[in-house]
Every structure is written in structure tokens, then in C-alpha cells.
Amino acid sequence: MKTIKKTRDYTRLREWGVHLLVLAIWEIACRTAIPAIYLPAPSAVFMAFVATIKSGELGTQLGQTASVLFLGFFLAMVTGMLVGVAMGMSRTLGRILDPYVNALNSMPTVALVPLVVIWLGLGYEAKVFLTWLVSFFSIVISAQTAVQNIPHAYLDTARSFGSRPLATLNKVVIPASIPYFVSGIRLGLARALVGVVVAEMFTALSGLGFMVTTYGNTFKINFVFVPIVTLAILSVLLNAILRWAENRLTPWNRGRQR
């Protein structure tokens, strides 16, 4: 056990060392070769972080983005799971909805913004709807694929024991599909982050996307990196939570994960 712990500690230390080395190279390159108008140094970005935190701007705009993201993504997760599972369990429904789901999933997010603005305006509802829209179809496709790829032996065994459809869904289909569900949710989360930022950049009223647009228009490049880095940190944290949830929900699958 001590050897395993030492190995893990050494691996983490090595990983942090690589991250610190990247930051050091970035800092040196920006101070010696790269103009600040193109790429600010990490120290300049850190000072911009401090300034936006002290002014309260970062907290306010992050709260706006987080509220839109969580509501839109939660709605996409619930509705996407329901539709995807239904499509996976019903071949007829799957054949009917497949063309629409694949077409809308492939549509560029930016192309949808003008329509959403016309339908819902520039307010909170438009941002939530766009966030839901861009992440919904990825979750549907993953949930459908998960159900369709359940080994037939599982379903045949459940039927042989007289399991009813609802019991089969709860005891067989959903547990066997959880790893695929989590993968689909992670893909949907990535698209939801893109959707909420695009919505905020086009409406230019509030949120981290608003900060990107505002500081980009005034060429404050170090401040542009503040919302970008914040979004990256938020994405990492949310993905870590999803991995933790997957480990809790699928203890039999932990040995395959690294």
C-alpha cells in the first residue's frame, strides 16, 4: 500500500511539475518574444483576475453564466435522456426521429442564434433555450446508442425471469447504460458551454461571453483571458464531478477507469 501511495504521489507531483513548466515557458516567451497584444503573460492574466475579482465583475458575470448553463444543461440532460432511451427501446421511434436528431445535431450553433433572438429576444430565456438546444441532441444520440448496445443476453435473462418492461428498464437497461450516459452528458456539457458563451457574445448583455466581447473590442487581451480561463476551470470541475458520479453509480466499472 505504501508503495502504491508513493507511486501516486510521485505521478501527481510530476503532473504538477509539467503544468508549472508550461506556465514558466509561457511567461518567458511572452516577456521575450511574443507581444502582449497577441498573447499576455500568465502574470498579466493573474493581475487581471485580481482586478475583476476586486471589482466584483467576475463574480457577477460568472453567476449570470452559471445560472444559464445549469438550467439549460439540466433541461437538456433530462429531456435528452428521456428521448434517447425511448428511441433506443423503440425501433420505430428511432427510425422516425433519427434524421431530425442527426440533422439538428450537425447544425452550427452560430446559425441558430438569429432565429433564437427573433423567437425569444435577447433575455435570459433565449440564452437558456440556446444552451438547451446545442447540448440536447448530443445527449439524445449517446443515450440512444447506450440502450441499443446493451448485450442481448442481459435482456434475455431478464425476460426469462419474468421481468416486466418497467422493471427491466430500471434494473437492466439503465444500470448497463450509465457509462454511456455519462459520456453523453460530458459531450453535452462541452456543447452547453459553447452554447452559453455564443449566446452571451451575441446578446452582449451579461455573462462571461459578454466579458470576452467587451474586452476584446477594447484590446485588453489579458482581461479577455479571464473569462476564458474561468470557463476552462469550470469545465474541468464539472467533468471531475461527473467522473465522481460515474464511479459512485458504477462501482463494478472502476477497475477499467484510470
Image (cartoon, rainbow, N blue to C red):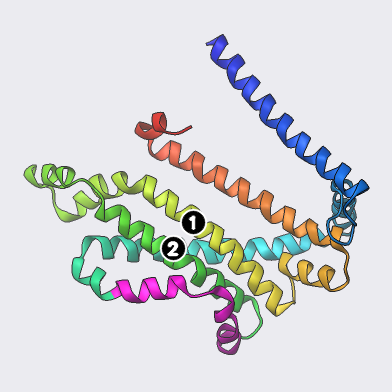
Q: On the picture, is 72 further left or further right than 41?
A: left
At 70% from the left and 73% from the top, the residue drawn is 201
What is the magenta segment's predominant secondary structure? helix
Where 24 sits versus 76, above or below?
A: above
**Where residue 87 sits in the image (x, y, percent)?**
27, 65
The crowding category of the residue bearing disc 1, from other C-alpha atoms within 10 Å (few below 14, some 14 to 19, many at least 20), is: some
Where 187 sits versus 1, above or below?
A: below
**Where residue 12 sits in the image (x, y, percent)?**
65, 27
Dot 1 and dot 2 residues touching (CB under 8 Å) = yes
State whether residue 56 appears in this view: no
The tag on residue 187 is 1
Q: Amino acid at mark 1?
A: Leu
Residue 107 shown in magenta: yes
Q: On the picture, is 91 further left or further right than 139?
A: left
Work out whether residue 174 or residue 219 is closer to the camera in this orientation and state it: 219
Q: Amino acid at mark 2?
A: Ser
At 86% from the left and 54% from the top, the residue drawn is 40
Query: Which residue extends farthest bottom?
Result: 118
Q: CA distance from mark 1 to mark 2?
A: 7 Å
The tag on residue 138 is 2
At 65% from the left and 51% from the top, the residue drawn is 234
Q: Which residues are magenta?
A: 97-120
